[in-house]
Image (cartoon, helix red, strand yellow):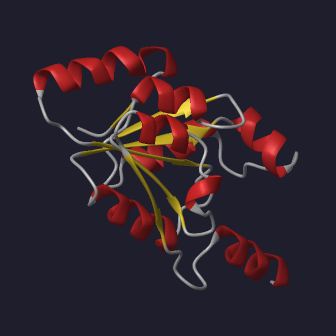
Amino acid sequence: MNAVTAFSDIGNFIQKKRKDHPGIKIVFTNGVFDIIHRGHVQYLEQAKLYGDLLIVGLNSDASVRRLKGQSRPFNSQEDRAYVLSRLKPVDYVCIFEQDTPLELIMRVKPNVLIKGGDYTVDQIVGRDFVEKSGGSVHTIPLIEGRSTTNLLEKINKG
């Protein structure tokens, strides 16, 4: 069931899901997910608990370079999307080109918007839209010592 869905198709795709499954609760999160690690997997498992369908917005390679610098991402958007789409809690992955997922959030119209605990609820892009649409916004605590930054520090120390 897990799949990568095109940005241009996501709105119609979600509309059909809602029509075929009345009452379905759609959860949305987003990120770079460059080097998948335990923290990512546990975060996605917890996000999935908030609803029936978990959609992950994935920053495109160009978006990652603008946000994190020219040395990133380490893995291509195709590889990152492939790995994410194979994780059990993830139902669909959608790559977005923009620096923020706002346009994608507006297309998906999730019931629940989730980000990691390194954000506060007021910092979450799309919060106003989701709340005005009757949805909820949550953060999930990060797992101490389980981050891409920690992995990169270990790699650089050798």
Image location (x, y in percent) of residue 94: 48, 32
Residue at 83%, 77% (x, y): give it: 156
Quarter where residue 16 is shown = top left
- In the rendered image, residue 56, in percent from the top left (x then y), is placed at 45, 43
Q: Report the residue at 55% width, 46% height from top.
A: 80
Residue 59, above or below 87: above
Q: Is residue 149 above or below residue 26?
A: below
In this rendering, is residue 155 above or below 127? below
- Judge whether residue 105 can be spotted in this image: yes
Q: Position of residue 102 (x, y in %)?
A: 59, 33
Residue at 61% from the left image edge and 55% from the top image edge: 122
Relative to residue 150, is residue 82 drawn left or right?
left
Which of the pair 94/71 is nearer the observer? 94
Q: Residue furthest right?
A: 70
Query: Residue 42 location, x and y as percent?
Result: 40, 70
Q: Residue at x 66, y 37 (%)?
A: 100
